Amino acid sequence: MILSNISVPLLGLVDTAVIGHMSSAHYLAGIALGASTISVLFWLASFLRMSTTGVISQAFGQKNTRKLTMLLQSSLLLAVSFALLIVSLQGVFLTAIEQLSGASEQVIEQANLYFSIRIYSAPAAMCNLVLLGFMLGMHYGKGPFYLVLFTNLINIVLDIVFVVGFDWGVAGAAWASLIADYSGLVFALLLVKCLFKRNEIAWLWHLPARTEVSQLLTLNRDIFLRSLMLQLCFSFMTFYGARLGELTLAANAVLLNFLMLVSFALDGIAYAAEAKVGHAKGQNDTNKIQLWVKLSVFWGAVFALLYSLLFAIFGNQIIMLLTDIPEVITHAYRYLPWLIILPIIAMACFLFDGVFVGLTRAREMRNSMLLAATMGFFLPFMLTTSWQNHGLWFSMTCFMALRGVSLFYRYQQLRRQGILLQ
C-alpha cells in the first residue's frame, strides 16, 4: 500500500515537471488552479473509498459473502450518482474558479481548459475509489498497487506524448489523466473479478436491506462532511495563494507535491490499518485492534522521520527538478522549512484516520476535522494574515497537528472505556 500510494504523487510530480518546464509561469499556475479544483471534487469523493473499506473489512471478518456483494453494489451505485452530479454542475465550478481565485486572465484560461476536459473522468474516478476500497477491505493489498501503478504509468506516458510530443500543453495533461482514469476502471474491474473467483464469491444482485442502506448512507454522510472540511482548507491554500500573486501560486503548486508525497506514503500505512482494524472489529477482537494501532504508529513515525530528512537534504534539488523558472524556484525556497517539519507533525492525523475508518466511527472523524479546520486552520490564519504565505503554511501545520491530537485523544477514550467494538 505504501508503494501504490507513493506512485500517486509521483504522477503529480510528472504533471508539474512537464508543465513547469514550459515557457511561462502562467501555465504552471493554471494547471495548479484547474487540477486543484479537480482534486477538491475528487477528494470530496474519498468518502466512497473510506466507507467501502470500513464496511467491507468488517463483513470480510464476519465471512458474510452476501453482505460483501450487496455493499459493493450499493457503493458503486452511489459512486455513479455522485459523479453525474459533479459533471452536471461543472458550469458552477468553472465560475467559482474565476470568481474565487482572482488570478490573471491567462491563468484562468489555462485552468478552465484543464478543468473542462478532466471533469469527464469523474464516473471512472469515483468507481475506481469504490473498487480500491473493496480490494483494501478484502486484504488484497497487491490489487490497489497494480491498479494505481497501471493508471499512473499510462498517465505519465500520455503526459509526455501529449504535452511534449504533440505540444498540447495544459490540455494534453488533462486528456492524459482522463484516458488513464477510464483505463484504470477497466483494469480494476478485472482485478475484482479475479478476487471474487479466488474467494469463491458468487456475484448476485441483491436488494439491499433498508437498515444496511441507511447505515451506509449515514457513514458516507459523515465522511463526506469530513472530506469537505479537509478540501476547504486545501483549496483555501490554493485560492488565497492566487491572491498573493502568480509566483506564490506557482511556488505553492510545487511545494504541495512535497505534502502529497508525505500524505500518500503515510496513507499507505493508514489504508492497511483500515483493513486490519476493520477485520479485527468484524471478529470482535479488541486486542488485535490495539495491536494494529501500535504497529501503525510505529511505522508511521519511522517514515515521517525519513521524509523530514529527505526534504531537509534534497529539498532544493526536488524543487529544481519540478521547475526551471528562476522566480518560482527562489520563491519556493522561502517556504521549504515548513515542508521539512510537516511529516512529523502530520503523522498522527493520517494514521488515526485509518483507525477510525476501520472502526466505522465516522462521526468522530467529522467532529475532529471540524475542530481542526476552525481552531487549527482558519483561526491561526486570521491571526497571521500579515505573514502572507508563511501564514498559510503555519495554519496548515496547526491544522495537521490538531487533527492528530484530537483523534488520538478520542481513541484513548474509547480504549479506556472498553467500547472500541461498539
Image (cartoon, rainbow, N blue to C red):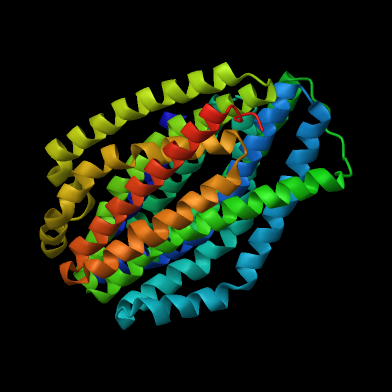
The residue at 31%/49% (across/down) is 257
Give the vertical position of 12 relative to 103 (above or below): above
The residue at 12%/64% (across/down) is 327
Going by the image, does 275 lie left or right of 94? right
Residue 324 placement (x, y as % from top left): 16, 56
> Residue 396 lies in what quarter of the image?
bottom left
Residue 253 in view in this figure: yes
Going by the image, does 194 lie left or right of 6? right
Residue 129 in view in this figure: no
Going by the image, does 324 lie left or right of 366? left
Residue 1 placement (x, y as % from top left): 47, 29
> Residue 63 lies in what quarter of the image?
top right
> In this view of the protein, which residue sits in the foreground, 123 or 58?
58
Count of number-bearing discs = 0
Query: Which quarter of the rendered picture does the C terminus lie within?
Result: top right
Give the vertical position of 269 relative to 71 (above or below): above
> In this view of the protein, which residue sits in the foreground, 238 or 24?
238
> Residue 313 lies in what quarter of the image?
top left
The residue at 74%/26% (across/down) is 196
Residue 12 placement (x, y as % from top left): 36, 49
Give the vertical position of 315 relative to 269 (above or below): below
> In this view of the protein, which residue sits in the foreground, 193 or 211?
211
Residue 98 placement (x, y as % from top left): 41, 80
Farthest front residue in view: 417
